[in-house]
Structure formats: C-alpha cells, structure tokens
Image (cartoon, grey):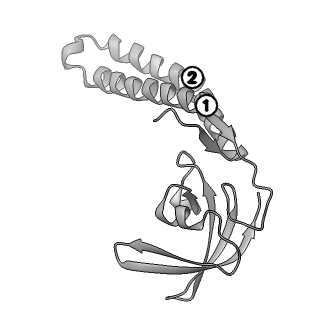
Amino acid sequence: MSNEELMLTPEGLDELKAELEELKTVKRKELAERLKVAISYGDLKENSEYHSAKDDQAFMETRILQLEKMLTKARVVHSSDASTVSIGSFVKLNDLEFKEIVEYRIVSPAEADAYNNKISYESPLGKELIGKVVGDTVSVTAPMGVIKYEVLDIRAN
C-alpha cells in the first residue's frame, strides 16, 4: 500500500475497525488455543496442526498490520452531493447493449465487493463514473469488449 490517503465511506471505516477488533481479540485468542492444543501433541517437526496454526497466525498478524496501516491513512468521505458521482455514491446504470439496469456503490479499493455491488473508484468502471451526472454515457473496456452504460440515477449515502 502506498503512502497515499485511503478514502473510505463511513461504513467502510466501521467495517475495517470491526475486522481489526475481531482479529485482535477473538481470533488471536482462538489461535493461541489452537497452538496450545497442537503443541500438546508433541513433536513439532511433523505436527501438521501446529504448522497450520502457525501459518494462520502469520496470515492474521499480517492482516492486523495491514489494517492498522490502512486506518492510519484513512480519510472518511461523505457523499452528500447527488448531482455528480463521487466516492460513496449509489449509481443506477442502464447497460445500453443488454438493456439491463444495474446499481453500484462507488467505494474505496479496501471496501470493494463485487458480490454486493460495491465497486472501487480505481476500477475501470469506477474511474469512468467519477464526476459523471445523470444522462451521461460511459464506456468501459472489458474482456468481452466495450460496455456502454447510461447514468440513470445518483444517490448520496
């Protein structure tokens, strides 16, 4: 992660803080218990439970450091202007080829979640949408070709 600010929605900030708290309290204790049980099996060289728990611990501690770094660089962005697309906006789009209506929320890369229609402002579509107004058309190059969308509606958070 670079030294740049990390722009987050208020909900995104809360989610990162909650994840950090969960890792530091609940998950650390669970892993400590797993390690204690694994150590009780003896011979650590060939103890797969021990090695698995140590790997999980390393991953968790790395994630904790990553979250702490992200939170020190976080700046909360409040989307209160529904006239243009910005971070935090909910955007309703019409896929001009398939005549399909889709809605996305523009969020930071740390909050992006395609399954919940949250797209990063750094994604190809997110980059194209920032600053657009209702009625604008955007084009995004995808593996299947160029996709064109019309901005139908913008809601602030």
Residue 101 in the image, given as x and y percentages of width and height: 61, 81
In which quadrant of the rendered view does residue 50 lie? top left
Relative vertical location of residue 110 with respect to residue 118 in this rendering, above or below: above
Side (left or right) of 81 relative to 144: right
Q: Residue at x 22, y 11 (%)?
A: 43
Q: Residue at x 54, y 53 (%)?
A: 112
In which quadrant of the rendered view does residue 18 lie? top right
Q: CA distance from mark 2 to mark 1?
A: 14 Å
Q: Residues within 10 Å of mark 1 (few under 14, many from 20)?
A: some
Between residue 45 and residue 23, name the one nearer to us. Answer: 23
Front position among marks 2 and 1: 1
Residue 1 in the image, given as x and y percentages of width and height: 45, 35
Q: Looking at the rendering, in which quadrant would you find the C terminus?
A: bottom right
Mark 2: amino acid = Lys
Residue 53 in the image, given as x and y percentages of width and height: 36, 24
Residue placed under numbered mark 1 in the picture: 71
Q: Are marks 2 and 1 in contact (CB under 8 Å)?
A: no
Q: Which mark is residue 24?
A: 2
Q: Which residue is most to the right?
A: 80
Q: Residue at x 51, y 21 (%)?
A: 28
Side (left or right) of 7 relative to 148: right
Determine the secondary structure under disc 1.
helix
Count of all numbered marks drawn on residues in the image: 2
Between residue 63 and residue 80, name the one nearer to us. Answer: 80
Mark 1: amino acid = Leu
Q: Residues within 10 Å of mark 2 (few under 14, many from 20)?
A: some
Q: Which residue is most to the front?
A: 131
Residue 155 in the image, given as x and y percentages of width and height: 76, 66
Q: Residue at x 47, y 63 (%)?
A: 124
Between residue 153 and residue 59, name the one nearer to us. Answer: 153
Q: Earlier in the sequence, mark 2 or mark 1?
A: 2
Determine the secondary structure under disc 2.
helix
